[in-house]
């Protein structure tokens, strides 16, 4: 994995996301209840605060939980809820160590079927069906991970030419389109109530 992503809209953060499978997963995990760019800057911030070039699942998994939560809480905080997200990131890393020897890329490497890949993503701590589908779409659309049936497994997020999620962000223009789509969906939910 070594591509250019534009999810954080910050070159150093995006560079890490494009070369580090774990950073991409952590960014996706953080992508809730905060702006997308903030979430996807998180992995770079965490690596910097750990004094590392990259994130290491083994290292994060064994961090003292209180110290790791404090690391995420330092200003500027990595997330609106740094304590609970620190716990989730550690749970994700512990799962990866236990099931994939700490290598996040093994979640998708060599998987030949989209449904199997979706199942694996849904098993990750903090990944429900929607988050798993969005990450699957990101893998397929931008990271070249395209097992048979990946678009179908990703649901609407896998559709070509759509602007529904982070899977569709390739720059500032597409970020604007994704934001507009999300605002449209929120407005539709409000008017349905």
Image (cartoon, rainbow, N blue to C red):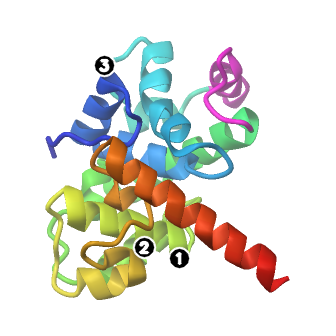
Q: CA distance from mark 1 to mark 2?
A: 6 Å
Numbered disc 2: secondary structure? helix
Numbered disc 1: secondary structure? helix
Disc 2: which residue:
133
The spot of residue 151 in percent (x, y) is: 27, 82
Question: Does the magenta-highlighted stretch encompass residue 108?
Answer: no
Disc 3: which residue:
53
Q: Earlier in the sequence, mark 2 or mark 3?
A: 3
Question: Does the magenta-highlighted stretch encompass residue 65?
Answer: yes
1 and 2 marks in contact (CB < 8 Å): yes
2 and 3 marks in contact (CB < 8 Å): no
Numbered disc 3: secondary structure? loop
Please indicate, yes or no, whether residue 102 appears anywhere in the rendered image: no
Q: Is residue 48 left or right of residue 17?
A: right
> Residue placed at 31% from the left, 38% from the top?
17
3 and 1 marks in contact (CB < 8 Å): no
> Residue placed at 41% from the left, 36% from the top?
8
Q: Earlier in the sequence, mark 3 or mark 1?
A: 3
Disc 1: which residue:
129
Please indicate, yes or no, whether residue 88 appears anywhere in the rendered image: yes
Marks 3 and 1: which is nearer the front?
Answer: 1
Q: Is residue 78 left or right of residue 13?
A: right
Number of residues whose C-alpha sits closer than 10 Å to that of mark 2, classed few (under 14), some (14–19) or many (20 or more): many
Q: CA distance from mark 3 to mark 1?
A: 31 Å
The spot of residue 140 in percent (x, y) is: 22, 67
The spot of residue 82 in percent (x, y) is: 70, 33
The spot of residue 107 in percent (x, y) is: 31, 62
Number of residues whose C-alpha sits closer than 10 Å to that of mark 1, classed few (under 14), some (14–19) or many (20 or more): some
- Look at the image and give the residue range highlighted in magenta: 64-80
């Amino acid at each position: 994995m070594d591509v250019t992503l534009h999810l954080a809209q910050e070159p150093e953060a995006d560079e890490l996301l494009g070369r580090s499978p774990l950073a991409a997963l952590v960014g996706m995990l953080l992508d809730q209840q905060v702006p997308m760019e903030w979430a996807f800057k998180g992995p770079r911030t965490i690596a910097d605060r750990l004094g590392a070039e990259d994130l290491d699942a083994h290292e994060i998994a064994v961090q003292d939980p209180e110290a790791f939560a404090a690391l995420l809480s330092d200003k500027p905080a990595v997330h609106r809820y740094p304590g609970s997200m620190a716990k989730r990131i550690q749970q994700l890393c512990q799962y990866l160590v236990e099931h994939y020897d700490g290598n996040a890329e093994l979640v998708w490497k060599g998987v030949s079927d989209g449904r199997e890949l979706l199942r694996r993503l849904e098993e990750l701590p903090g990944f429900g069906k929607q988050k798993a589908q969005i990450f699957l779409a990101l893998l397929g659309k931008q990271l070249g991970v395209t097992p048979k049936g990946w678009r179908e497994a990703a649901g609407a997020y896998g559709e070509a030419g759509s602007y529904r999620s982070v899977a569709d962000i390739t720059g500032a223009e597409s970020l604007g389109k994704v934001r507009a789509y999300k605002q449209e969906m929120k407005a539709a939910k409000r008017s349905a109530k």
